[in-house]
Amino acid sequence: QVQVVESGGGLVQAGGSLRLSCAASGGTFSTYLMGWFRQAPGKEREFVAAIARGGSNTAYADSVKGRFTISRDNAKNTVYLQMNSVNAEDTAVYYCAARRAALSGTLFVTSSSYNNWGQGTQVTVSS
C-alpha cells in the first residue's frame, strides 16, 4: 500500500496563491490515481480535484474550477495542487488520497473510493 504525506499548507491572503504537495512512498506511484479533498470546520470532507494515473485526465469541483490545478510528476512520486485566487471558503484541512487504478484514465471523485490517505495539511486564507 502506498503512503502519502502532504506539505505546503499555511496562511495565505485572499487572492493569493499556494502550492500543496503530496509525496508518495511504498508503492508504484504510476499505478495510482490521486485525489485532493478538503474539510472545513463543521463541514463534511469534500472533493477538490483528481488526476488519473498518467496525468491525462483530471477532474475538479465546481468551486475550484479555473482557480486550482492538479498535476503529478511520476518520476518524483508527487502530486501537486496549485491554488490560485484563494478566498476564505478555501480555508480547510487538505487531504491527499490515493487509489490503485487498473485503467490509465480512471478518475474517482468520492472519498469512499480512495483507500490511502494522508494526515492533511492546514490551509488558512486571511481576508
Image: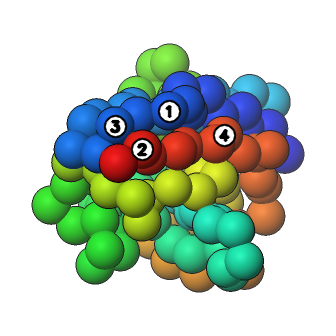
Name the amino acid, label 3: Gln
**Residue beneath the point at 20% across and 55% down:** 67
Q: What kind of element bears circle 3?
A: strand
Against 6, residue 122 (above or below) is: below
Q: Which residue in the protein does label 1 denote? A: 11
Q: Report the Cα–Cα distance between label 4 and label 3.
A: 17 Å
Looking at the image, tell me whether mark 3 or mark 2 is earlier in sequence order: 3
Q: CA distance from mark 3 to mark 2?
A: 5 Å
Per the rendering, the mark at residue 121 is 4
Kindly identify which residue carries mark 2.
Answer: 126
The residue sitting at 72% across, 33% down in the picture is 5
Residue extending farthest to the right is 1
Locate residue 89 relative to residue 117 in the image: left or right.
left
Query: Upstream in the sequence, badge 4 or badge 1?
Result: 1
- Label drawn at residue 13: 3
- In the rendered structure, the answer to whether residue 69 lies left or right of residue 24 reads left
Amino acid tagged 1 = Leu
Residue in front for this viewpoint, 38 or 28: 38
| Discs 3, 2 touching: Cβ within 8 Å | yes
Q: CB atoms at circles 3 and 1 under 8 Å apart? A: no
- Residue furthest to the front: 127
Q: Looking at the image, which residue is at 28% across and 78% down?
A: 62
